[in-house]
Image (spheres, grey):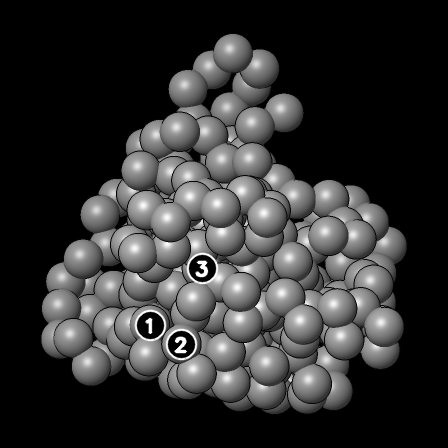
Amino acid sequence: MLPGKSLIDQFLGPDALKTVGELTKDRKSLATGAAAGGVLALLLSGGKPKKLIKNAVKLGGVALVGGLAYKAYQDWQAGRQPQAAGAGEPPPALPKPEGTVFLPAETGAAEALSLKLVRAMVAAAKADGHVTSAERRRIAAQLPQLGLGAEAEALISEELDAPLDVGRIAALASSPEEAAEIYAASLLVVDPEAPAERGYLAMLAARLKLDPRLVEHLHANALALVEP
């Protein structure tokens, strides 16, 4: 199985928006597991894929989500005002989450967290309703081409086939910090301005019991990590 950390790193890494065709032609990418990024391209084919700024991509998926949630938590607890970077301004520096509750040092705990975030991202990708039965069949036909391995394919397929249930995704969080990370991972996948996705995020924040001000910080910081 592709480890959870590797899988989410590829969801949010530099290959995340490559097409399946590009990835399957690139044998080097397949050999290194970079083809996992094609999952996000598959899931968002009917939506609006985001492109992360280079500094964000370099962090890697789980470190990026953890750092985003960690900074939002720090700013929220300090009583700061949510503020996204303006045009031409550098994005806010994210604290390193390694070794904190946002990215445990223990391998098993880090892997478990990463798989929760992957599930949250796949669920969020379905929020706009574009993954219809026909789209699901197309994804099923192309997913094996990415070379993820049977277990990783099964996890993604299981989440795709599950009913969209905000409560189930929220229940993955075992702490307030994980709740913020699950929301952050979901936020990086969807278009928060689109009605369906906006509604999904609102329900998710409520089920996760996130403070509205913390949610504002998560949105402001996430916006600064996405290219215009």
Task: Write down the quadrant of residue 84 in the picture.
Answer: top right
Q: Position of residue 23 (x, y in %)?
A: 49, 48
Q: Amino acid at mark 2?
A: Gly
Callout 3: SS: helix
Question: What residue sits right under mark 3 in the picture?
Answer: 36
Q: Is residue 44 above or below residue 52?
A: below
Callout 1: SS: loop
The residue located at (43%, 44%) in the rendering is: 26
Q: Residues within 10 Å of mark 3 (few under 14, many from 20)?
A: many
Q: Give whichever of discs 3 and 1 has the lower sequence position.
A: 1
Judge depth for marks 2 and 3 and give the one in front. Answer: 2
- Asked if marks 1 and 2 touch (Cβ < 8 Å), the reply is yes
Question: What residue sits right under mark 1 in the picture?
Answer: 2
Question: What residue sits right under mark 2 in the picture?
Answer: 149
- Asked if marks 2 and 3 touch (Cβ < 8 Å), the reply is no
Q: Amino acid at mark 3?
A: Ala
Cα–Cα span, label 3 and label 1: 9 Å
Cα–Cα span, label 1 and label 2: 7 Å
Q: Amino acid at mark 1?
A: Leu
Q: Position of residue 100 (x, y in %)?
A: 19, 63
The residue located at (22%, 47%) in the rendering is: 96
Q: Nearer the viewer, residue 169 or 28?
A: 28
